[in-house]
Image (cartoon, coloured by chain):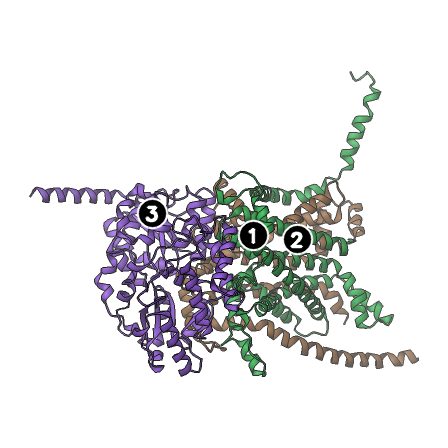
Chain colours: A purple, B green, C brown
Amino acid sequence: MKKLALLTALALASAASAQSLSGTVTVWSWDAAAKALESTIPSFNKKYPNVKVNVVDLGNQNVYDRGLAGCAAGGADMPDVYSIENNEAEVFWARFPNCFTDLNTLGADKLAKNFPAFKWTELMAGNKRFAMPWDSGPVVIFYRRDLYQQAGVNANAIKTWDDFIAAGKKVNAKFDGKVKMGVVANGQDDEWFRMLANQNNCFYFDNAGTSVTVNKTGCVDALTTIKKLYDAQVVATGDWGGQITSFKAGRSASAMFGAWYEGTIRTNAPDQKGKWGVYPMPANKAGGVRAANLGGSALALPSSSKNKAAAYAFMENALATTNGQVTMLKSQGLVPSLLSATKDSYVKVAQPYWGNQKVWQTILDTLGDVPQARGTQYFQDARQVMIVVQADYIKGKYKTAKEALDDAAKKISSATGLPVAK
Amino acid sequence: MTTVPQPPARPHPVRKAGWWARTPKAPYLFILPYLIIFLTFWAWPILSSFMMSFKDSRLGDTAPFGLANWSRLVQDEFFRTALRNTLVILVIQVPLMLSLATVLAVALNSKLLKAAGWFRFAFFAPLVVGTVAYSAVFRLLFNTDFGMVNRGLTGLGLPAVDWLNQSGPAMTVLILAMTWRWTGYNAIILLAGLQGISEDVYEAASIDGATPWQQFWKITLPLLRPSLLFCLVLSVIGTLQLFTEPALITNSGPGNSTMTLGTYLYQQGFRSFNFGYASAIAYTVAAIAAIFSVVQLRLFGRDE
Amino acid sequence: MTTAMQAPKDKAGVKARNRIKAFWLHLALIPLAALFLAPLWMMAVFSTHPESAIFSANPPLWFGGAFGENFRGLQADTNYLRALLNSVVIASLYTVFSMLLTSMGGYAFAKFDFPGKGWLFGLILATLTIPTFVTIIPQFIMVARDMQISNTYWAVILPTLANTIGIFYMRQAFQTVPTDLLNAARIDGASEWRTFWQIALPVVRPAMAALAILLFLASWNDYLWPLLVLTNKDSYTMPVALGTLIGLTRVSWGGIMVGTAIATIPFLMLFLALQRHFVAGIAGGAVKD
């Protein structure tokens, strides 16, 4: 009886404070992410009826550029909630340490354990928590069931990259080399390297962000594998648009990306419904890790916001509640990073586009295995170097992957001022 | 006071009045509105960004003044690559485009041309189109497997080219795209220049028996010099700051084989937030552009 | 006698020769013009197809039926008509004021001698060599933080009103105006302003028409600056509105193509309208024919 009274009192108290929040919360975001945030407004307004949320879809690069200008101008014209990609986040904390609110002051430290550790790595500076994890990009292979079957390839039997290459040779033989196992953006981006390196627990920098580790074993293995894929002629080269053209034309038997690519395939090739499936990325060696992360975003709260309590409440409802994250998964295919959301019953629903496979389960099952990696504030510098080195190595400019990555490490070190790890 | 003669003091006020009288006020008044806006919005940004080049912005606001950025610039391989790529484009694309623009301007100025307005529109129209859509179309045109250009080549029995994934071909695409977009712009300026040339000059030359070829070299080109100089200076400066095409069509790739000073500067300033280093790059670009411009103005200027 | 007999014959010869010349001229120009228009054609065609057609293996070459659908999507996502209106107002204001400033300044540099002329012109010209990426953030700090005029037309227009290319161009143009013509007006008692406005300006009208197009165009397609100073969706310009369609993993190509196609039309009209000024410029020669 006493307990019930206490609960009622608490509920009333929180309802009262919820009622007291008012005003407008402006949110900057992009494409599907903006639509996903919009889909959480009804549940938010149920709790906070007096807060008006205004989600502005600015486009991805625009959000970044405006954030740069706004922070440089001491917070002028910044919104109340700011979307930021994980690997681009640290440069903001480093250059503009006063531009964003430490979310711990609003209670975010209590939510820390509700998200996987790797999602926090880039969102913190010292003890300060500058953004809240949003979605993630667990890496998987998307594949065409029909093409694999015609070539006599069993997706479930592909457990290592060597298996993947062997399957690719079968596909090449079956389709006269017209269909490839994948398209790599070699020369335009180093995504494949980042995915494979992350899988092998290696990245440009160590997790403390104090030294360059791009020439360590895991990274060398990653680059070696990419070269093997090229040497076996099982992959083609193409940029983002070229990859879409390729799978639409049925020239790609598979594609590897963060799970957010699900929406890209589904919306661009509606006619291929039922033909696609998903399996975890192959491991470097039998029994090795079959998980990595590519991409994912977070929400930050600019210091210049005049409505911080309401802005934080909005972020909390969208990102830190199972209901919020599952709503975004349902509406826009945003892969949740909130651990409780990954166990929601919706995750176990069979998806008709994907041949009734429970793809979200397959995808989210890998989330716990993703090794930590840190982009640091020098992510863009390192990436630029790596794009060039990878392309040069594939072209045959270096003898070994180790030699290539030693050179990359040297260049990244000189661009960032960080030492190469011993 | 007035009755006291002051001979020694006289020359001075007279000279002052003379200076005041002799100094023309009209030109200053004509320039004043421009100058007010110009100084308000440019003086401080230029000064502050230049000072920035002496600060290592990776160390935060409190970084001491020093030459860190400038010494990095000297050793930076990426900067050298960007500089080399930019100069290659400059040397090939600018002469190509200006020759084409000059020929086009003369053709468009011809009285023999029917529907001249529509032709002018055709060559000028590329400039009107938003860069995002234009770049996407060029990427599609030069797509290796499905692009129209390769279809045309294979149709003619020529081998298909992997345009955007190889250094040389990617550079070619850039140069073609830039020429497509900017030739009309220059042709319009040259056309306006041509229309300032009196018909009588040509008639007199015809009577003297000058061939059209001679007329072009002896009359058109010399009289077109101010307009050509204008186009040349702007094209060189524009190319040294080239950003749109390499950013949107080739993404500086493959690797960094089409990275330009403009894209590298953007990368450093707007992606890596390394404002100090970006400033060092920017003012190096400015210095190169200034040297080029002065040389051009000296060589071809000799106004009036 | 003989000369009188020969003249018509010669004229006939010239006519025949001109006809051949005209034939070659058109033969060379028509395919070239077609080549220049081809990408525009593709853009127009893409604007009438659903988004997925753009990346298909066989891109369409002829118009489809999805223009309306693309446009409705674009309008819903960006309030595109409002953005077009903003762009027209901003580009027009910009063109008028910038023309005024740059022609006055260019006139002074071309037709007067005064102390400081050389280095002042050099200083103005020198700013042209500085890449905008490096000055745009300090300018933003000034406009957004210090002046607090974000989301106004003036925030977009003012900083680039003192157009360097414009003053350079007008200086070149005024140099072709004979000084005697101006002195004659002055002797007749015209003020400096009247000499400029009524004598000098009309002479450079074709050049001004060209500059007007170029200035309008520069403002019409300007992207980064308006993006920074216009944070309110209702004040977006056309390129900023289209820029919002470029997401992280999804780009609304249908919207971009249809938006670009629509944005090109007012230009086509403006260009064809100002065409007359060019034609007026050569009217003297044309009438003689």
Crowd band around label 1 with a 10 angstrom C-alpha radius: few (<14), some (14–19), many (20+) = some
- Compared with A209, B249 (above or below) is below
The amino acid type found where label 2 is placed reads: Ala
| Marks 2 and 1 share the same chain | no
Q: Contact (CB < 8 A) between labels 3 and 2?
A: no
Q: Which image quarter is the N terminus of chain B in?
A: top right
Crowd band around label 3 with a 10 angstrom C-alpha radius: few (<14), some (14–19), many (20+) = some
Q: Residue at x 81, y 81 (%)?
A: C13
Could you say where residue C220 lies in the image, as x and y percent from the top left?
A: 54, 58
User: Separation of disc 3 and disc 2 at Cα?
Assistant: 48 Å
Q: Tell me which corner region of the image, top left, top right, bottom left or bottom right, holds residue B176.
A: bottom right
The amino acid type found where label 3 is placed reads: Thr
| A248 relative position to C238: left or right | left
| A334 relative position to B98: left or right | left
Determine which residue is flagged by label 2.
B289
Determine which residue is flagged by label 1.
C93
Determine which residue is flagged by label 3.
A24
| B3 relative position to C24: left or right | right
Q: Contact (CB < 8 A) between labels 2 and 1?
A: no
Specify the label residue A420 is tagged with: none
Label 3 residue SS: strand
Q: Nearer the viewer, residue C181 or A33?
A: A33
Crowd band around label 2 with a 10 angstrom C-alpha radius: few (<14), some (14–19), many (20+) = many
Q: Residue at x 57, y 40 (%)?
A: B66
The amino acid type found where label 1 is placed reads: Leu
Q: Nearer the viewer, residue C41 or A157?
A: A157
Q: Is label 3 or label 2 in front?
A: 2
Q: Residue furthest front?
A: A422
| Marks 1 and 3 share the same chain | no
Could you say where residue A22 lies in the image, as x and y percent from the top left?
A: 29, 44
Q: Chain of mark 1?
A: C
